[in-house]
Image (tube, rainbow, N blue to C red):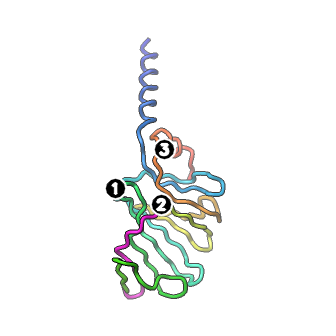
Amino acid sequence: MKKGRVVIAFLLVLLTASFIPVHCLEIEELRKGRVLFVHAVSPGDGFSIGYKHSVELCSVWDYYRIDETFRIVLYETTFPSCNTGLPVAPSENETFHHDGDSFRISNMNRIIPSISLWVNQEYDNTIMIGSETSKLYSLAGNTLLGVAIKKEAVVRFVLMLSLIHI
């Protein structure tokens, strides 16, 4: 009888947990609809994405934060030159800086619903979350990836974590 109550209690906890939402940064292989990476996020959290520019062959970094409504906000971009295909001027309310050997556009407040990017080992696509850095091409090879904030039930989030091997 005691075992039955424990099982029922466990099932009730599991059922209740299935309704608790978790916001997560999700990276998906868009062509196959396969989730490759998940990471729980909270407002104020940040991440950055770097890549080698295809024309200038220099490193470009975009810096993002999660706002209070779990939107992705681009707040800064850094790059080493203002040549072909790279930014040359800030938009309204943005600030352009030259920091010796690099340029920076800050005070950006661009809401980005999701990020689609073609990753390729040749372009060294990288994501940094906190102190953790991952090469994006190592997730699925040279392909189209999507980065978005999703709201998942905690049970689904835990299952996704257990199924993804990075």
Asked whether, in this view, residue 91 is left or right of residue 159, the answer is left
User: Along the polypeptide, which appears first: circle 2 or circle 3?
Assistant: 2
Q: Mark 3 sits on what residue?
A: 157
**Which of the 4 quarters of the picture holds residue 130?**
bottom left
Q: Is residue 106 magenta?
A: yes
Q: Position of residue 137 (x, y in %)?
A: 60, 64
Q: Which mark is residue 84?
A: none
Q: Position of residue 30 (x, y in %)?
A: 61, 57
Q: Is residue 25 above or below residue 99?
A: above
- As helix, strand or loop, the secondary structure at mark 3 comes to helix
Q: CA distance from mark 1 to mark 3?
A: 20 Å
Question: Could you classify mark 2 by the number of other residues whose Cα lies within 10 Å: few (under 14), some (14-19), or many (20 or more)?
Answer: few
Q: Position of residue 124 (x, y in %)?
A: 57, 71
Question: Could you classify mark 3 by the number of other residues whose Cα lies within 10 Å: few (under 14), some (14-19), or many (20 or more)?
Answer: many
Asked whether, in this view, residue 4 is left or right of residue 98, the answer is right
Q: Are marks 2 and 3 in contact (CB under 8 Å)?
A: no
Q: Is residue 118 magenta?
A: no
Q: Mark 2 sits on what residue?
A: 113
Q: Position of residue 109 (x, y in %)?
A: 37, 69
Q: Give the magenta part as a residue range.
A: 99-113
Question: For the point 53% across and 45% down, which residue is it?
Answer: 160
- Nearer to me, 154 or 96: 96
- As helix, strand or loop, the secondary structure at mark 1 comes to loop
Query: What amino acid is found at the position of numbered circle 3 in the picture?
Result: Phe
Q: Mark 1 sits on what residue?
A: 68
Q: Residue furthest top?
A: 1
User: Along the polypeptide, which appears first: circle 1 or circle 3?
Assistant: 1
Question: Could you classify mark 1 by the number of other residues whose Cα lies within 10 Å: few (under 14), some (14-19), or many (20 or more)?
Answer: few
Q: Residue furthest front?
A: 92
Q: Are marks 2 and 1 in contact (CB under 8 Å)?
A: no
- As helix, strand or loop, the secondary structure at mark 2 comes to loop
